[in-house]
Each structure stands twice: as C-alpha cells, then as structure tokens.
C-alpha cells in the first residue's frame, strides 16, 4: 500500500511571488522617482538655457544700441554718395547733350539789317516734365526722358518803312544752310507781328516781331 502525501498551502494570493526577478511593486515607484528626477533635471536645464538666451539677447540689444549711431551715419553717407553719383551721371548726360549756339549765332549779325533791333534772344526752358512716381523711394535727378525739346526765341523791333521786308529777310536767313545745322524750323507765331503802339504815335511805323526757332532735340544718352 502506497503512502499518501498531503500538501497544505497557507499562502494568500497577494503573498505569492512570481517567477520573474523584477518586482512590480518595487519598479513602479522607482520608475516614478526616476521620471520625476529626470523631469526636474530637464526643467533646470531649460531654465538655464532660457537664462543664457535672455542674457545673450540683452547683450546683443545693448551692442546694437551702441552701434546704431554709427549705422545711421553710414546709411546717411551711402545716401549722399548715391545722390552724388546720380548728380554726376546727370551732368554727364547734359555734357553729351549740349547744343552749341555760339558758332551758329556768330553768323547772325551778317544777316540782321540795320533797321532791326533785337530786344531778346533767349532759349526758353523745356516744357515741364510729369512729376515722378510717388511710389519711388528715390526721386530721380535731372530729366526723366531720353529727349528734350530745344527752341530759340528772337524778339525785336524794326524801325523803318520797309520793316516787314527786313523781318522777312531775317526769317529767310535763318532757313539758310548757315543756320540749318542748329535751326530746324523758323517761323513767326500768330499774333507776333504787330505795330509798336505802346511808344506813342511817332513809333507807329515800328514793327514788333517774334521769331520762334525749333532747334531739334537734346538727347540724354
């Protein structure tokens, strides 16, 4: 007859140990402590980083404030230098666009009868140019067009009985080859050929006249 053995289990379920060497009741609190410590270290590092960035920002702002007067001065000098370059460039355009009147007008006395007296010999200013675009930050200097109309205005009086013929002779002389390299067209504007009534009856034979000459275009290239 076999001997029967009796096994009595007095452990409760919560007192049983698993076969794994890792104990959950130990690891969970340990992991929680490590997480809190890690979070605290990360927070301290973040605070230190923010403090360094703030200090660096303060130093940079102070440095920029110290450099601002010098920077403004450099910008002002650059603006003046740019304006000076533009002015020099415009002067160069005017230099190459000059129309020489002296040589041509030097021949004019040979064609002016003694009865004619000039009271004005003038090159009128060119027509007004449209204002620059207000959207432009830098206003252009000098002409904004490539060409500019040039004219010559001759005003005077003729004081003889043949004053009309003398003025017509002068007008025809301005159309001769000696002047055509300067004068493209010469004409008496409407209403610019009249008697000199402002000086009294004795001057009624005097004729006031005006001759307008088209001298072509001044080219800015």
Image: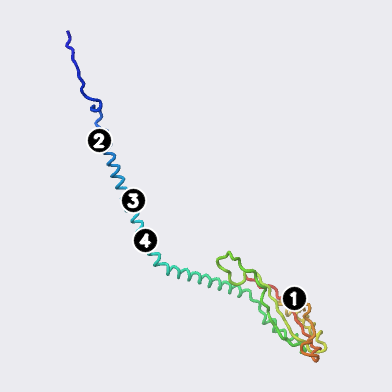
The 10 Å Cα crowd at callout 3, few under 14, some 14 to 19, many 20 or more, is few
Asked whether the residues under the numbered discs 1 and 3 touch, taking CB atoms below 8 Å apart as contact, a structural biologist would say no
Residue hosting label 1: 185
Q: Which of marks 4 and 2 is in front?
A: 2
Residue hosting label 3: 46
Would residue 7 be found to the left or right of residue 209 on screen? left
Would residue 206 be found to the left or right of residue 136 on screen? right
Q: Element type at marker 1?
A: strand
User: Which quadrant would residue 113 be assigned to in this image?
Assistant: bottom right
Mark 1 vs 2, N-terminal side: 2
| Relative height, residue 122 to residue 78 (above, below) | below
| Relative height, residue 24 to residue 104 (above, below) | above
Q: Which of marks 4 and 1 is in front?
A: 4
Q: Residue at x 71, y 80 (%)?
A: 153
Q: Element type at marker 4?
A: helix
Mark 3 vs 2, N-terminal side: 2
Q: Where is residue 207 in the image (x, y as percent from the top left)?
A: 79, 86
Q: Element type at marker 3?
A: helix
Mark 3 vs 4, N-terminal side: 3
| Quarter occupied by the N terminus | top left
Mark 1 vs 3, N-terminal side: 3
In the picture, the disc for residue 7 is none
Q: Where is residue 100 in the image (x, y as percent from the top left)?
A: 66, 79
In the picture, the disc for residue 26 is 2
Q: Element type at marker 2?
A: helix
C-alpha separation, residue under disc 3 versus residue under disc 4: 18 Å
C-alpha separation, residue under disc 4 versus residue under disc 2: 48 Å
Q: Which colour scheme is used?
A: rainbow
Residue toward you, 41 or 77: 41
| Relative height, residue 158 to residue 14 (above, below) | below
Mark 4 vs 1, N-terminal side: 4
């Amino acid at each position: 007859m076999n001997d029967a053995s009796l096994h009595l289990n007095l452990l409760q379920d919560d007192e049983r140990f698993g076969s794994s060497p890792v104990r959950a009741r130990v690891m969970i609190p340990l992991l929680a402590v490590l997480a809190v410590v890690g979070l605290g270290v990360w927070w301290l590092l973040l605070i230190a980083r923010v403090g360094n960035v703030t200090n660096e920002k303060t130093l940079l702002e102070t440095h920029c404030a110290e450099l601002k007067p010098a920077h403004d001065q450099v910008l002002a000098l650059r603006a003046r230098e740019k304006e000076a370059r533009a002015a020099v460039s415009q002067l160069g355009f005017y230099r190459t666009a000059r129309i020489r009147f002296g040589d041509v007008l030097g021949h004019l006395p040979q064609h002016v009868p003694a009865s004619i007296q000039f009271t004005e010999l003038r090159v009128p200013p060119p027509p007004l140019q449209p204002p620059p675009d207000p959207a432009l930050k830098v206003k252009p200097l000098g002409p904004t067009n490539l060409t500019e109309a040039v004219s010559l205005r001759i005003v005077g009086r003729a004081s003889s009985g043949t004053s009309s013929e003398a003025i017509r002779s002068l007008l025809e002389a301005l159309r001769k080859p000696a002047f055509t390299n300067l004068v493209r067209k010469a004409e008496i504007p409407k209403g610019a050929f009249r008697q000199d009534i402002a000086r009294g009856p004795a001057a009624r034979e005097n004729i006031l006249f005006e001759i307008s000459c088209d001298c072509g275009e001044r080219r800015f290239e």
